[in-house]
Structures are given as C-alpha cells and as structure tokens.
Amino acid sequence: GAGVSQTPSNKVTEKGKYVELRCDPISGHTALYWYRQSLGQGPEFLIYFQGTGAADDSGLPNDRFFAVRPEGSVSTLKIQRTERGDSAVYLCASSPGTGDTEAFFGQGTRLTVV
Amino acid sequence: RKEVEQDPGPFNVPEGATVAFNCTYSNSASQSFFWYRQDCRKEPKLLMSVYSSGNEDGRFTAQLNRASQYISLLIRDSKLSDSATYLCVVSTSGGYNKLIFGAGTRLAVHP
C-alpha cells in the first residue's frame, strides 16, 4: 500500500516568506508526527497529533511554526516569516495507534530558505 | 549536553567485519529504545527495538544497559548493503511518541 506522502519534495523560498508543507499519512493511521532534520543531525521532534488534536507540540521552536490536522488525516505544517535557520528536511511520520506501534516516515520535504 | 550521544564515525570496515556502535542517553526516564537506519537522502527506517534482555535479528544484536544508560548495536558479517547512518533513538513517553534521535553513526562497508 501507499506509504506516507509529503509534498512538495523540495521547496525553495525567500527569507520572510510563508510556507506550507503537506503530509498525507498512511490510510487509517491515527497518530501523525512532524520532525525536522538539519544537515548532519538526527531528526528533531516538532509535534504529535492523535486524531485531530495536537497531543504534544512541545518541539515547535517558536510561534512562527504551526501545524494542523483538521480532519484527522492530512496535516499541514505552516512556517511564517521563514528564516535561513529554518532550512532543513521536514519529515512526517504516522502510526496506526496511540504510539505503541511502529511509526513510518515519509521521504520528507527539503526546505531551503535563501 | 545532547539527550542522545553517538560517535559520528565514519566507521570504514571491510565486508565480513564485525562492527559495534555505542550510544548513551541522558534521561533516566527513557522507556523505549530503538535503532533506526537512514540511507543517504532517505527517510529513517526502524531497524530494531532494543530490550533490556538484549535482542537479536539475524546479523544484528542490540543491547541495553539501563543502569549505565547505554545502548549498543553489533553488526556481524557486514555487507556492502549495510552502508548507511545508524541512529540511536529513545522515547520518554513510551512507544513511538516523541522519539529523541542521536545524530547518527555513519557506516561505510567496502569490498
């Protein structure tokens, strides 16, 4: 079956612009996660959804970052007033249950802020 | 201090070699432990969970020492296809929620 799908695969934006990154989880998966991976580092947790609600958003670095999952399926990560330091690969993952089953990652969106 | 620390490598080994990776974690409340594998410019994929009793999956053996807050991965009879970055991962909430990744150890297996 289809895996986690993320679009776009690459995004180049100018400093100060607004961007939206989309994640389509595996069908039926109720848990959805966003991570950010900078060059040479492991993924860093941003936010976790269980259904439509954000169960844990403690990893969002500041109020420029926001994520939604209005219908409990597709999620959008929104970044306002982008900065060069936001450049990274943004990874989405989903899992079937409440977190006790394997989370599967998408291939990520590579964001470059110039 | 990072929550999960790993030797970044790279480890360059010949085919057939045995190689060991080590990892330490700082939060004693960590409940779940994993090794993930990440190929260049690809997403991380679960290699194996790690249990206190130690566990083995084919050529891969993982060990956990909660007292020392130390996790290891042993790869026997290395294959060219084992070349990748190996990420040590812990979770304080249990399961796969809020995974904390190390920076990864790069392995290069050569003929």
Image: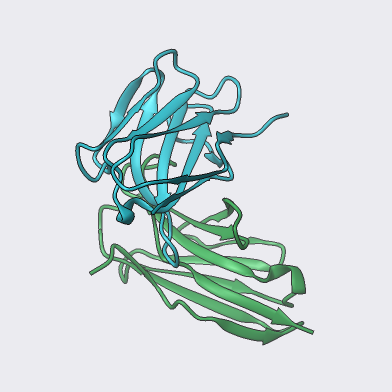
Above or below residue A73? Residue B39 is below
Please tell me in which quadrant of the rendered image residue B66 appears: bottom left
Q: Quadrant of the N terminus of chain A?
A: top right
Q: Position of residue A114 (x, y in %)?
A: 38, 54
Residue situated furthest left in the rendering: A63
Above or below residue A27? Residue A66 is below
Q: Residue at x 44, y 26 (%)?
A: A75
Specify whether B64 is left or right of A16: right
Q: Residue at x 36, y 43 (%)?
A: B98
- In this rendered view, identify the residue nearer to me: B1 or A75: A75
- In this rendered view, identify the residue nearer to me: B105 or B95: B105
Q: What hue represents chain A?
A: cyan
Q: Which chain is green?
A: B
Above or below residue A78? Residue B92 is below
Q: Specify the color scheme.
A: by chain
Q: Residue at x 67, y 71 (%)?
A: B83
Q: Is residue B32 visible?
A: no
Residue situated furthest top in the rendering: A71
